[in-house]
């Protein structure tokens, strides 16, 4: 997964590759491979993994009190696997009010998957809540952790947009009353609404990510996230510097450097 992720991010410097070709996680595990006999193994090199950021704001010991909590936990009244073609089956479930406003949640990543918690973003008395794992993610088949090659077959933004429409038609929903997405989910929500404007009544987006080169650079290339955890950024760079034969060149494209090593 991480190998494909780095391959994609590094390629952003060179070409407009479809973003969902990679399963993005926002962090990198450094992999060292070694072999014994005919068997090959991969282990994490923990020498370059920094400790968690400090809780200087004491938000763990003294968490922020919000005006209201999430809605109560609920169980789905319908679950299934939808065959969308290209060898992919998407895991989905439906909960809340069967006669309520149709709402769908689009997870981030790409590749993060959903959890029962995301149902709690919606008032179950008002919304008919649909959640699903996008191609290669969560309970969908094939999952990237089980079969990376097959999970990436036709795993593109246009295909994910079509998957949402196929799920809508499968559930006999005329129109989404609400499409909720964050991070990569906001990117996908916008792409879906642009493709099927007549099938979307409203969008609710948070952590909007448009996948521009400036955003990619900010996250992984020019140190924009340094202030969030300086030690993590320093070790991220240090591994490349310690293993580089051309640091002046590689420090300008850290993602490309990671890809070369993997």
Image (spheres, helix red, strand yellow):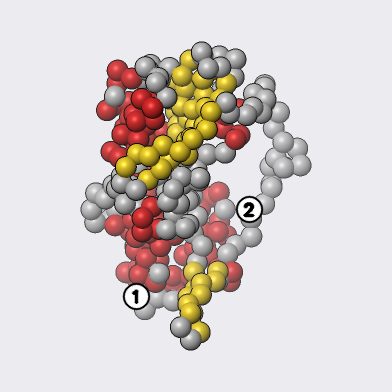
| Label pair 2/1, CB-CB below 8 angstroms | no
Q: State the residue in front, 92 or 111.
A: 92
* Residue 121 visible at all: no
> Which residue is labeled 2 in the image?
53
**Which one is nearer the viewer's eye here, 24 or 72?**
72
Which mark sits nearer the N-terminus, 2 or 1? 2
Q: Residue at point 49% right, 27% down?
A: 130
Q: Residue at x 55, y 49 (%)?
A: 228
177 versus 78 height, above or below = above
How many labels sit on residues?
Answer: 2
Q: Is residue 134 above or below residue 174?
A: below
- Vertical position of residue 213 compared to residue 96: above or below: below
Q: Quadrant of residue 247?
A: bottom left
Q: Which residue does the numbered mark 1 point to in the structure image?
A: 246
Q: Position of residue 239 (x, y in %)?
A: 48, 70
Instruction: Tell me residue 97's x, y (percent).
Output: 56, 17
């Amino acid at each position: 997964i991480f190998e494909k992720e780095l391959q994609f991010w590094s390629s952003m410097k060179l070409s407009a590759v479809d973003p969902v070709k990679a399963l993005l996680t926002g962090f990198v595990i450094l992999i060292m491979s070694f072999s014994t006999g005919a068997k090959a193994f991969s282990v994490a090199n923990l020498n370059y993994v920094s400790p968690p950021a400090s809780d200087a704001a004491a938000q763990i010991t003294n968490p922020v009190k919000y005006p209201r909590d999430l809605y109560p936990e609920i169980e789905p009244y319908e679950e299934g696997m939808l065959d969308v073609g290209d060898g992919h089956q998407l895991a989905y479930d439906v909960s809340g009010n069967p006669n309520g406003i149709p709402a769908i949640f689009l997870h981030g990543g790409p590749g993060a998957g959903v959890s029962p918690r995301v149902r709690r973003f919606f008032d179950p008395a008002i919304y008919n809540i649909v959640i699903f794992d996008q191609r290669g993610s969560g309970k969908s088949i094939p999952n990237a952790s089980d079969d990376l090659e097959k999970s990436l077959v036709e795993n593109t933004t246009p295909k994910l947009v079509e998957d949402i429409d196929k799920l809508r038609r499968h559930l006999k929903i005329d129109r989404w009353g609400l499409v909720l997405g964050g991070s990569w989910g906001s990117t996908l929500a916008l792409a879906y609404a642009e493709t099927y404007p007549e099938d979307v009544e409203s969008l609710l987006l948070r952590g909007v990510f448009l996948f521009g080169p400036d955003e990619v650079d900010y996250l992984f290339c020019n140190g924009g996230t340094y202030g969030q955890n300086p030690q993590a950024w320093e070790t991220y760079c240090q591994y490349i510097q310690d293993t580089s034969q051309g640091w002046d060149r590689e420090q300008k494209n850290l993602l490309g450097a990671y890809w070369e090593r993997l």
